[in-house]
Image (cartoon, helix red, strand yellow):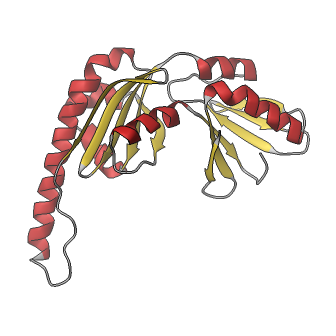
């Protein structure tokens, strides 16, 4: 089943597994009429007979295409993806081969939460918390280097998720420059990283993201 969520600025996003895309497209035609198709900035824009628009974004690591046949071929092609999900106190890192998670590691580290009113000196607390966050990011970078770097030459893309600031901090490690260069523009919204979240992220990372600017779809 396709997943749907509101889009910033209006409309909604629909995430469709590549294998289910032909079925979704058939439903789109049935509801709105045969669409005109044009390529734009790596996307495919479908404009149906009734004016409904659907913008198809290729999955991470897939090439853009000028027509639906090429888009489908690229979206369903076998790829290996790196996954880096992180929040300040936890990280989940893995390699997906197609829809299978073949390498994975999850770890967590203590980062002090916010103080209650009337607690210790705010400056001292902020410094301690900052040091803990930096140490956690460093350990997450070690983990990413150990798991993802050996596979870097085989990865079509690296897909990130979680807290953007924490992810940026991890990828700023010089050892991870080859991985940072493979980073996809898609960033996943995920809960605190664990193995279940990492497995779900494989499917989200492989999906075709479809933007429906209006309410139809």
Count up the numbered dots: 0
Q: Position of residue 217 (x, y in %)?
A: 77, 45
Instruction: Pick the residue in front: 136 or 179.
Output: 136
Residue drawn at (13%, 54%) of the image:
132
Up the image or down, 161 lies above or below 176; here it is below
Counting from the top left corner in percent of width and height, residue 7 is at 62, 54
Image: 163 above or below 34? below
Work out whether residue 59 can be spotted. Answer: yes
Query: In which quadrant of the rendered view does residue 64 lie?
Result: top right
Horizontal and vertical percent position of residue 77: 57, 16
Q: Depth check: 124 or 116 in front?
A: 116
Q: Residue at x 87, y 45 (%)?
A: 51
Q: Quadrant of the N terminus?
A: top right
Asked if residue 107 lies left or right of residue 167, the reply is: left
Task: Determine if residue 67 is in view.
Answer: no
Q: Position of residue 46 (x, y in %)?
A: 78, 35
State whether residue 66 is above or below residue 46. above
User: To which quarter of the image does residue 59 belong?
Assistant: top right
Q: Is residue 94 left or right of residue 124?
A: right
Residue in view at x 57 percent, y 33 percent: 207
């Amino acid at each position: 089943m396709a997943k749907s969520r509101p889009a910033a600025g209006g409309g909604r996003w629909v995430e469709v597994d590549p294998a289910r895309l032909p079925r979704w497209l058939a439903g789109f035609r049935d509801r709105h009429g045969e669409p005109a198709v044009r390529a734009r900035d790596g996307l495919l824009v479908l404009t149906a007979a009734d004016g409904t628009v659907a913008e198809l974004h290729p999955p991470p690591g897939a090439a853009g295409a000028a027509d639906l046949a090429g888009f489908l071929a690229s979206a369903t092609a076998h790829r290996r993806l790196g996954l880096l999900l992180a929040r300040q106190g936890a990280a989940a890192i893995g390699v997906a081969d197609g829809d299978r998670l073949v390498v994975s590691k999850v770890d967590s580290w203590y980062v002090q939460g916010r103080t209650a009113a009337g607690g210790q000196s705010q400056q001292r607390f902020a410094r301690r918390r900052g040091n803990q966050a930096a140490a956690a990011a460093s350990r997450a970078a070690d983990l990413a280097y150990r798991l993802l770097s050996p596979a870097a030459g085989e990865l079509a893309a690296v897909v990130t998720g979680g807290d953007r600031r924490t992810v940026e901090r991890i990828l700023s490690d010089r050892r991870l420059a080859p991985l940072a260069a493979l980073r996809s523009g898609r960033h996943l919204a995920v809960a605190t990283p664990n193995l279940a979240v990492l497995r779900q992220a494989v499917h989200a990372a492989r999906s075709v993201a479809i933007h429906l600017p209006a309410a139809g779809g």
